[in-house]
Amino acid sequence: MSLIFKIVPRAEWEGQSGDYHGSAHDRADGFLHFSTALQLPETLRLYYAGKDDLMLVAVDANALGAALKWERSESRGEDFPHLFAPLSCDAMKWARSITRDVDGSFKLPDLI
């Protein structure tokens, strides 16, 4: 199983039921943004610096089928997983809190 990850504000995550249709940013772009485990720290730093109370959702990339595309981000110089469909409950493996260290930096949960 190959895991990819979605960062979601807790209130948004808890306000959803069933399949996840993405944030307003996802819907405006036409796909759901994901990161690999190695991409998570920089994604958090760039896009969630002032945010708290975040959830990390682990997803089985293999369960997403052809709707998952790996696309190049020129600004980051790497390929990112983008889902061109709602995220089905069946593909979700777990959702855990992202906390902060004493110095304020993000502390990711165990990714396994």
Image (cartoon, rainbow, N blue to C red):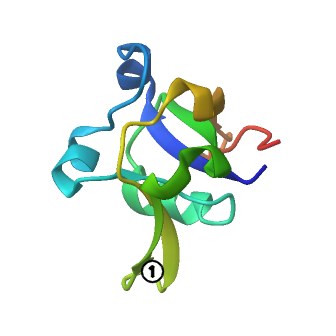
Q: Is residue 105 visible?
A: no
Residue at the image point whose x is 37% and y is 82% from the top:
75
Residue 37 in view of the camera: yes
The residue depicted at 60 percent of the width and 35 percent of the height is 91
Which residue is located at x 42 percent, y 24 percent? 19
Q: Nearer the viewer, residue 7 or 3?
A: 3
- 4 lies above or below 99: below
Of all residues, the one furthest to the front in this rendering is: 66
- Residue 93, how many percent across, how many down? 68, 31
Q: Quadrant of residue 74?
A: bottom left
> Regarding mark 1 in the picture, which secondary structure is present there?
loop
Query: Where's residue 70, x and y in %?
Result: 49, 70
Q: How many numbered callouts?
A: 1
Viewer-proximal residue among 63 and 25: 63
Q: What is the x, y in percent for residue 26?
A: 28, 48
The picture places residue 8, in percent across and down from the top left corner, at 44, 35
Quarter of the image containing the C terminus?
top right
Instruction: Give the crowd class for mark 1: few <14, some 14-19, many >=20 residues within 10 Å.
Output: few
Give the image quarter of residue 42: bottom right
Q: Along the horizontal axis of the image, is 90 left or right of 79?
A: right
Q: Is residue 32 left or right of residue 5?
A: left
| Amino acid identity at mark 1 | Arg
- Of all residues shown, which one is farthest toward the left? 28
Query: Which residue lies under the disc numbered 1?
Result: 76
Residue 88 drawn above or below residue 79: above
As drawn, 13 above or below 8: above
